[in-house]
Image (cartoon, helix red, strand yellow):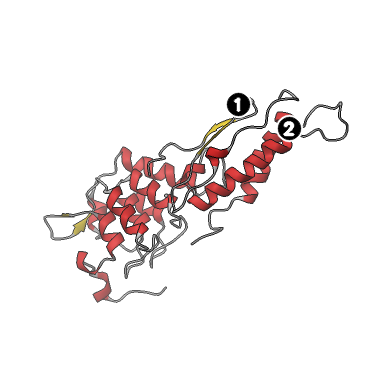
């Protein structure tokens, strides 16, 4: 980078309240770095009894029921609509509904967003801090439900649905979200973590412009910033940190 380049204007990086309104796009005019790290800015134990196994829509928590959707199968079982009502789901989240709320079986909204193939809903839940590693009472996580490869629920109506490209997209989203922070999965982190990543990235840009020892020496430059992105940010930004 040019030694006398102007300090980048990063005012547009500053997060806005309330969650999840935060600018996901970072860029500067110096040529040091240009990251487009957000692609959907409009969006943020024990065995059960037989009675618990027979869950109905009326017994589902409100957020879970909204993700499941309004479709009832010909067998009378509640099953996801494959559509997704992101606006209503986000309204429930803003009202304080727990993004990781569980049914009596231990199912979470993230699990059912995967099992019914709703990638946009899944992204929204992840941006609100949904736990990728949560498991139900049989030990199945969201990825197992997304792939319809679960144990202990062979008669679940959702498993009769064919898996589609939408299910594959959900599996890819979960795999990406489970990885340490990177520019590629930044948009799947909750708002507070995204804001922390942008602030940390800004610090790295400023340091990369610093002359380390003498006034005539070159700035630390791009190599320093690459190392900052690869090693510092993944260690500094954790998905569960700042969890609300």
Quadrant of image for the N terminus: top right
Given residues 217 and 110, the one toward you in this image is 217
**Placement of 5 over or under 140, stated as above or below:** above
Mark 2 highlights which residue? Answer: 209
Where does residue 229 sit, x and y in percent of width and height? Answer: 64, 39
State the image coordinates of residue 9 (x, y, percent, origin top left): 60, 34
Assess whether mark 2 and mark 1 are in contact (beta carbons under 8 angstroms). Answer: no
| Residue 141 position in % (x across, y down) | 41, 57
How far apart are the two marked residues, 1 and 2, measured between alpha carbons? 13 Å
Give the side of residue 173 with respect to residue 233, left or right.
left
Residue drawn at 53 percent across, 47 percent down: 194
Tell me where residue 201 appears, x and y as whole percent: 63, 41
| The one of 15 and 166 positioned closer to us in this rendering | 15
- Residue displayed at 20% across by 67% down: 58
Residue 12 or residue 133, whichever sits in front: 12
Which residue is painted at 68% across and 39% down in the image? Answer: 204
Query: Does 114 appear above or below 201?
Result: below
- Mark 2, Cα crowd under 10 Å, few <14 / some 14-19 / many 20+, is many
Residue 154 visible to an observer of this rendering: no
Q: Which residue is mark 1?
A: 29
Element under disc 2: loop
Give the quadrant of residue 79.
Answer: bottom left
First-in-chain label (1 vs 2): 1
Rendered image quadrant of residue 77:
bottom left
């Amino acid at each position: 980078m040019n030694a006398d380049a102007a300090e980048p204007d990063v005012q547009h990086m500053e997060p806005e309240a309330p969650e999840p309104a935060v600018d996901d796009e970072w860029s500067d005019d110096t040529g040091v770095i240009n990251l487009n790290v957000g692609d959907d800015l409009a969006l943020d134990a024990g065995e059960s009894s037989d009675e618990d196994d027979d869950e109905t829509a009326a017994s589902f928590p409100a957020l879970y029921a909204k993700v499941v959707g309004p479709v009832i199968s010909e067998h009378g079982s509640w099953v996801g609509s494959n559509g997704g009502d992101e606006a209503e789901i986000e309204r429930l989240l803003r009202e304080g509904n727990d993004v990781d709320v569980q049914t009596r079986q231990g199912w979470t909204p993230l699990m059912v967003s995967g099992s019914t193939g709703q990638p946009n809903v899944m992204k929204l839940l992840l941006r609100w801090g949904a736990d990728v590693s949560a498991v139900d009472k049989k030990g199945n996580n969201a990825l197992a439900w997304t792939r319809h490869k679960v144990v202990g629920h062979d008669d679940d109506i959702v498993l009769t649905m064919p898996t589609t490209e939408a299910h594959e997209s959900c599996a890819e989203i979960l795999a990406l979200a489970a990885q340490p922070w990177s520019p590629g999965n930044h948009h799947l982190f909750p708002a507070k973590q995204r804001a922390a990543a942008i602030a940390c990235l800004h610090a790295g840009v400023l340091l990369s412009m610093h002359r380390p020892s003498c006034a005539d020496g070159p700035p630390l430059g791009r190599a320093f910033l690459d190392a900052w992105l690869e090693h510092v940010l993944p260690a500094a930004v954790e998905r569960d940190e700042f969890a609300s």
